[in-house]
Image: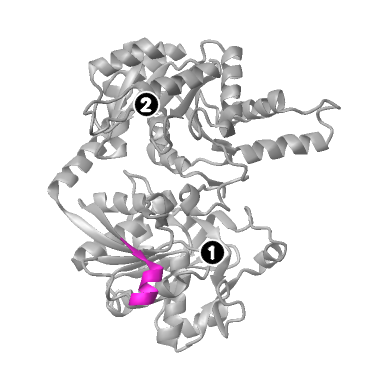
């Protein structure tokens, strides 16, 4: 059969949940028996998301192949339960780079290279190639940003051209915001109407309108959209705020969107089986009603944007913690603790009511001493602790200072000439740093490791199916960092009770450190990023065991 294309665009404001809609549509199509590959198109000129401050654009999502992508790729992985990679993510930076490189090689044979058609041809080529590589029946393409922005114009033009080339094989879903001003007391349809008019001005008529709002849409609003936006009333979909994003596919299905979508694509209407997904959503609802909560204190440095706090800087981490909490029948409650505040006021003033402490990913000197103090406080006070990447490195620094007695221990990331560099730059990374080659040059993607039998890490990985390869006895985690545990200090650390429970197959790098169960209820830190492999119906073992320890600590 011919490849089908579903575009998902956004209108009125950013951050509406286009990614959730794209992931939900992908799930509905896959449940109906069709192979789907989702693609996220970003507007920025960065080649990938790896060099972007997480406060600016959220937590970059790390793929198994090392691609540093937008966090919507993580949403797709969680909904579809499969690994995605570089073919599922593109930026305008990649597009420009490819076109310019091709021009430099004289591959355009003397043509003057222009935005249209050459940029739009490159965009379409990437969409088509992704479908071929993954052998997809349907490609779901999320257009980043908001309709009307000049940055994403070429994506919309490529959408229009592809629609002309493939009549009957392309559907466009427009997700817009329907506000309900408190002083009026009724939802207003005009913002989405104007957004659709912007789409029309680019030669695109949406097939579906998904109206995001605080509450469900009534018939009057649906009829207004149908009249002024030139769509059938049954193609206007209500998407009110939900108790969990995992309920959204069921909300769309209840309104018949899956059957309407298959009809518009000319595909056989197979009824999708969402039985397991429904069980998951119902369980989440029951847990929320139970009132059971586990409280985790996260000592980080990327919480603030202006005078506001944001979740997106640690999106994958929050999801992984929530998945593990649901596994135990608990709802997650997080306390965001600024590492810089810890430096000023101490850790003891910040941890009231928390059942566990976690230090996540981070970069650079700002707030590092606060994170080191948090790792030490959790160790001394016997509070369950989990360190991720930077949280592992700084836990090692804390142990070296307080237990081994190396008072000047540090990471060379923050103190290049540290007296005791217990964390140091990977030798292979020095050449990149010397020439300021930051993008895509870290230890990235999945790395195999051996886990020491008898350790808490081995117990966790071995306890749940699929996390240790039974043939090779290896496990794998995704990585995104340059600095490593300095093996010159391994013997001294181990003599004082630190357990190196996992090492990489390549280069024998320390991957996981922990304290024995008879010394601490739960103290573990990993150089990898297990949060990127967590799924709502398949939480990661490290998070499952950590949350269990936190619940026991209540």
The residue pinned by badge 2 equals 28
Q: Say above or below: 178 vs 411.
A: above
Residue located at (31% from left, 14% from top): 224
Q: Assign a secondary structure to mark 2.
A: helix
Q: Is residue 338 magenta?
A: yes
Q: Residues within 10 Å of mark 2 (few under 14, many from 20)?
A: many
- The answer to whether residue 404 is left or right of residue 235 is right
Residues 221 and 328: in front is 221
Q: Quadrant of residue 118?
A: top right
| Earlier-in-chain disc, 1 versus 2 | 2
Q: Position of residue 35 (x, y in %)?
A: 47, 26
Q: Position of residue 343 (x, y in %)?
A: 39, 75
Q: Which residues are magenta?
A: 336-345
Determine whether label 1 and label 2 are within 8 Å by CB: no
Residue located at (39% from left, 57% from top): 303
The residue pinned by badge 1 equals 504
Q: Quadrant of residue 188?
A: top left
Q: Say above or below: 169 vs 25.
A: above
Report how far apart the C-alphas of labels 1 and 2 lie in the structure.
38 Å
Q: Is residue 267 visible?
A: no
Mark nearest the camera among 1 and 2 is: 2
Residues 36 and 342: in front is 342
Q: Say above or below: 294 vs 508.
A: above
């Amino acid at each position: 059969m011919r490849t089908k294309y579903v575009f998902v665009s956004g209108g009125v404001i950013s951050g509406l949940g286009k990614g959730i809609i794209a992931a939900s549509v992908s799930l509905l199509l896959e449940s109906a028996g069709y192979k789907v590959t989702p693609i996220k198109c970003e507007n920025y000129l960065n080649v990938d998301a790896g060099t972007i401050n997480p406060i600016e654009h959220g937590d970059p999502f790390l793929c198994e192949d090392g691609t540093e992508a937008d966090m919507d790729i993580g949403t797709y992985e969680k909904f579809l339960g499969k690994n995605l990679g570089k073919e599922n993510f593109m930026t305008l930076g990649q597009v420009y780079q490819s076109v310019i490189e091709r021009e430099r090689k004289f591959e355009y044979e003397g043509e003057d290279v222009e935005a249209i058609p050459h940029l739009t041809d490159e965009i379409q080529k990437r969409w088509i190639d992704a479908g071929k590589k993954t052998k997809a029946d349907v490609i779901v393409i999320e257009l980043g940003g908001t309709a009307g922005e000049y940055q994403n114009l070429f994506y919309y033009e490529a959408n229009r051209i592809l629609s002309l080339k493939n009549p009957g094989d392309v559907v466009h879903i427009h997700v817009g915001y329907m506000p309900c001003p408190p002083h009026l007391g009724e939802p207003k349809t005009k913002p989405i109407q104007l957004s659709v008019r912007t789409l029309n001005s680019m030669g695109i008529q949406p097939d579906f309108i998904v109206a995001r709002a605080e509450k469900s849409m009534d018939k009057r609003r649906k009829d207004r959209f149908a009249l002024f936006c030139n769509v059938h009333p049954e193609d206007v979909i209500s998407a009110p705020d939900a108790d969990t994003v995992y309920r959204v596919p069921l909300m769309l299905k209840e309104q018949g969107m899956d059957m309407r979508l298959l009809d518009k694509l000319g595909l056989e209407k197979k009824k999708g089986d969402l039985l397991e997904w429904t069980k998951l959503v119902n369980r989440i609802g029951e847990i929320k009603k139970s009132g059971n909560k586990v409280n985790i204190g996260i000592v980080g440095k990327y919480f603030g944007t202006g005078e506001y706090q944001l979740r997106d800087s640690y999106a994958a981490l929050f999801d992984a913690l929530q998945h593990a909490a649901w596994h135990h029948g608990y709802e997650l409650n997080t306390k965001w603790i600024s590492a810089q505040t810890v430096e000023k006021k101490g850790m003891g003033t910040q941890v009231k009511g928390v059942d566990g402490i976690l230090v996540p990913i981070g970069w650079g000197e700002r707030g590092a001493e606060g994170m080191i103090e948090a790792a030490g406080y959790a160790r001394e006070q016997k509070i369950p602790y989990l360190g991720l990447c930077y949280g592992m490195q700084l836990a090692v620094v804390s142990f070296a200072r307080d237990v081994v007695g190396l008072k000047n221990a540090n990471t060379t990331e923050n103190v290049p000439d540290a007296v005791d560099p217990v964390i140091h730059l990977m030798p292979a990374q020095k050449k990149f740093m010397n020439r300021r080659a930051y993008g895509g040059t870290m230890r990235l993607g999945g790395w195999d490791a051996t886990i020491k039998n008898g350790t808490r890490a081995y117990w966790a990985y071995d306890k749940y199916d699929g996390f240790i390869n039974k043939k090779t006895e290896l496990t794998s985690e995704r990585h995104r960092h340059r600095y490593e545990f300095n093996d010159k200090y391994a013997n001294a650390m181990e003599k004082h009770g630190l357990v190196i429970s996992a090492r990489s197959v390549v280069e024998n790098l320390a991957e996981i450190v922990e304290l024995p169960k008879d010394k601490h209820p739960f103290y573990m830190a990993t150089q990898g990023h297990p949060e990127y492999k967590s799924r709502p119906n398949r939480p990661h073992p490290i998070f499952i065991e950590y949350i269990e320890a936190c619940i026991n600590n209540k």
